[in-house]
Each structure stands twice: as structure tokens, then as C-alpha cells.
């Protein structure tokens, strides 16, 4: 089979090595890691803007816990109905005792209108009875969900965390990580140039790096000060 060259910016898969424990996320990771060392049922909810690092946090925490002998079940929010259905099997019950991480739970909850709470409530109560810990991530605040009080009461019982912005000291590592994920290594001089001109919002930083690499590819120009400025 012949390969075709495509103008696509390569991205590395999520891994703990590519996750930057910046000031806005490190306290959350530490608190969650401590919680999962304890026994008993609990719900934790991590809220963050789109592209703020929620999924990467889940991957990082999963790898961290696996080194301690815990192996969380990870599912996407939209897959919760199918996952809940499997819990109806006694055999499935026997296979699920580790923590359950549901990434982007808002994608499911936004479809759960008043009167349709049964599935989520039953799932949470199953976790409670079986002493299974839950970690949920969401890009949507609880106040924006259309769910009835049966669902909301379970969510309000969660220990909630909000992903914050990185500190100025974190920016070099973040910019380096974003560029490395896309197959590019920026020089210290380039990174210093960007730190003086970019904010600390992760989504904006990511969009800038993508724009920079796109211009470099389309225009056939190496990444130097002029191109860095043109991409601003």
C-alpha cells in the first residue's frame, strides 16, 4: 500500500510524560491521588474549560494509580448508558471493583432532562452499594445542566475541583509540551519570545502553537522570530 503525505500536524497520544503538573492542576491531582488511596465510595468532579487538560489529567492519574496497584475503568460520558447496561449482569458486577473515571460526563448529562434521571441515579447508587469510587470530568458547570434534582443531588454531593491557570513559571514547560506533542522542538530563545507575548490561557496557547505550525508548513518557513510574530 502506498503512503500519501498529508499536511497534518502530528500529535502525540496522551501520556503521563507529556502532562505538565502546573499550578492550576497539581493540587487537584494530589487531592485525588490521596482520595483514591482510601477505601469506600466517593464522587469527585473536575470542572475545566474545553482543552484545559481534563482528559490528560485522567490519563496521568490513571498511570499514577496503576503504579500503586489500582486500575481505574475509563469511559467517555456518552458511553455511560452502555456501561450502565452492562452492570445489570452479575458477571459484570464481579469484574468491576476498581475506581470508575468518566471523562466529559457533561456530554451525557446534557441529554438527561427532568424525568429521565433513573439511569444515572441507578448507576451512582450501584457504585455506592459496591463502594466504588467515581471521578467525573466536565466542561460544563452544574448550573448549566438540565437535569432534575434526583441527578443534581448526586452531583452536588461530589467533591468538586476547578482547573486553574498555570503560573508564569509553568509557561516554558507548557509551551514546550504543546510543541513537542506536535513534533516540533522550539528553542529556548523562541520560548522566551513567546512567554513575553502570550497569556496563560491553555486554549489560547494551544491555538497559537497550532497556528504557528500551520503557517510554517503552508509558507515553508522555519520557526524564527519573524514567523513567531506573524502567528500572534
Image (cartoon, grey):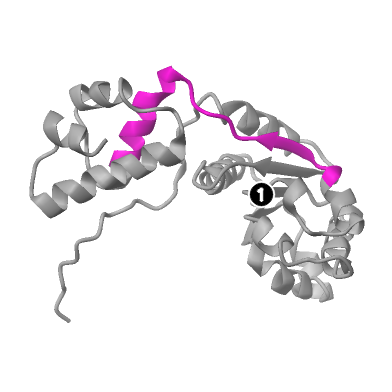
- How many marks are shown on the rendered structure? 1
Placement of 24 over or under 96, stated as above or below = above
Please tell me which residue is depicted at 72% across the width and 67% down the height of the picture.
111
- Residue 143 location (% of width, % of height): 77, 47
Q: Which residues are magenta?
A: 156-179
Seen from the viewer's position, the closer of residues 12 and 187 is 187
Task: Name the residue rendered at 77%, 69% in the picture.
Answer: 84
Helix, strand or loop status at disc 1: loop
In this view of the protein, can residue 134 be seen by the observer?
no
Q: Nearer the viewer, residue 21 or 160?
A: 160
- Residue at image position (56%, 28%) is 24
97 inside magenta stretch = no
Nearer to me, 215 or 176: 215
Q: Mark yes or no: residue 204 visible.
A: yes
Left or right position of 222 against 66: left
Q: Give residue 206's position: percent from left, percent from top.
A: 38, 42
Quarter of the image with the N terminus in it: bottom left
Looking at the picture, how far across and down is residue 205, in whole percent?
Answer: 38, 37
Q: Depth check: give the residue in front, 159 or 33.
A: 159
Q: Is residue 23 left or right of residue 134?
A: left
**Res. 74 image quadrant:** bottom right
Mark 1 residue crowding within 10 angstroms, few (<14) / some (14–19) / many (20+): some
Q: Which residue is mark 1?
A: 140
What percent of the width, then of the height, locates residue 12? Answer: 35, 51
Which of the 4 image quarters holds residue 79? bottom right
* Magenta region includes residue 159: yes
Task: Spot the residue most to the bottom.
Answer: 1
Residue at 57 percent of width and 39 percent of height: 64
Quarter of the image with the C terminus is top left
The correct choice, above or below, for 166 with respect to 88 in the image is: above
Amino acid at each position: 500500500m502506498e503512503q500519501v503525505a498529508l499536511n497534518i500536524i502530528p500529535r502525540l497520544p496522551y501520556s503521563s510524560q507529556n502532562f505538565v503538573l502546573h499550578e492550576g492542576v497539581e493540587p487537584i491531582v494530589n487531592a485525588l491521588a490521596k482520595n483514591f488511596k482510601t477505601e469506600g465510595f466517593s464522587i469527585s468532579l473536575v470542572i475545566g474549560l474545553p482543552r484545559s487538560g481534563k482528559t490528560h489529567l485522567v490519563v496521568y492519574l490513571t498511570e499514577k494509580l496503576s503504579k500503586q496497584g489500582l486500575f481505574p475503568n475509563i469511559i467517555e460520558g456518552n458511553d455511560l448508558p452502555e456501561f450502565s447496561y452492562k452492570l445489570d449482569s452479575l458477571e459484570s458486577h464481579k469484574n468491576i471493583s476498581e475506581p470508575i473515571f468518566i471523562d466529559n460526563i457533561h456530554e451525557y448529562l446534557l441529554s438527561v432532562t427532568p424525568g429521565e434521571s433513573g439511569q444515572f441515579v441507578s448507576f451512582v447508587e450501584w457504585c455506592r452499594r459496591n463502594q466504588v469510587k467515581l471521578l467525573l470530568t466536565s466542561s460544563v458547570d452544574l448550573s448549566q445542566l438540565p437535569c432534575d434534582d434526583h441527578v443534581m443531588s448526586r452531583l452536588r454531593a461530589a467533591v468538586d475541583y476547578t482547573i486553574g491557570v498555570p503560573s508564569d513559571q509553568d509557561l516554558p514547560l507548557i509551551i514546550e509540551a504543546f510543541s513537542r506533542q506536535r513534533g516540533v522542538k522550539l528553542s529556548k530563545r523562541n520560548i522566551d519570545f513567546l512567554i513575553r507575548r502570550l497569556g496563560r490561557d491553555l486554549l489560547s496557547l494551544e491555538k497559537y502553537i497550532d497556528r504557528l505550525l500551520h503557517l510554517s508548513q503552508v509558507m515553508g518557513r522555519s520557526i524564527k522570530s519573524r514567523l513567531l510574530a506573524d502567528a500572534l
